[in-house]
Image: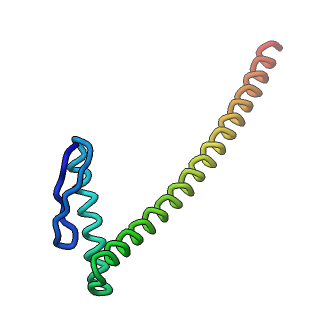
Amino acid sequence: MAQVTIQVNGRPYTVGCEDGQEPHLTELARLFDRQVRQVSQDVGQLGETRLFLMGALLLADELSDMKLRLAHANAEIARLNQEGTKAEIAAIRALDAASERIEKLAGE
């Protein structure tokens, strides 16, 4: 297990992670640090625990919004795929009907 020292609100924290996940963890820490610093800037120093809590809640809110937007996008994709399938079926039926008419005319 790897260990990484990250900085949040100017303080170092050593955390463990799976080997190879160090860059990802460092990037997540940067994201959290930006959020915590923004909260601190907006409302002032609340104490580390409250600052971290507010930062985590704001990130959770963003995540929740993104999940909702993703669900709506996936529903729209499914709807469009269904419409596309219906259009394909209609086109196939039209081609079949045209083919039958052509064959009928060719047989006369």
Give the residue drawn at x 28%, y 87%: 44
**Nearest the eye: 12 or 34:** 12
Give the residue drawn at x 24%, y 50%: 16
User: In the displayed image of the protein, which residue is found farthest to the bottom?
Assistant: 44
User: In the displayed image of the protein, which residue is found farthest to the top?
Assistant: 107
**For residue 106, above or below residue 85:** above
Q: Position of residue 97 (x, y in %)?
A: 77, 27
Q: Position of residue 63 (x, y in %)?
A: 44, 62
Position of 18 with respect to 82 (left or right) is left
Q: Position of residue 61 (x, y in %)?
A: 45, 68
**Nearest the eye: 2 or 32:** 2
Rendered-image quadrant of the N terminus: top left
Rendered-image quadrant of the C terminus: top right
**Nearest the eye: 21 or 100:** 21
**For residue 43, above or below residue 8:** below
Looking at the picture, the colour scheme in use is rainbow
Asked which quadrant contains residue 56, the reply is: bottom left
**For residue 57, above or below residue 46:** above
Count of picture labels: 0
Give the residue drawn at x 21%, y 50%: 23
Asked which quadrant contains residue 31, the reply is: bottom left
Q: Position of residue 20 (x, y in %)?
A: 22, 42
Position of 44 with respect to 93 (left or right) is left
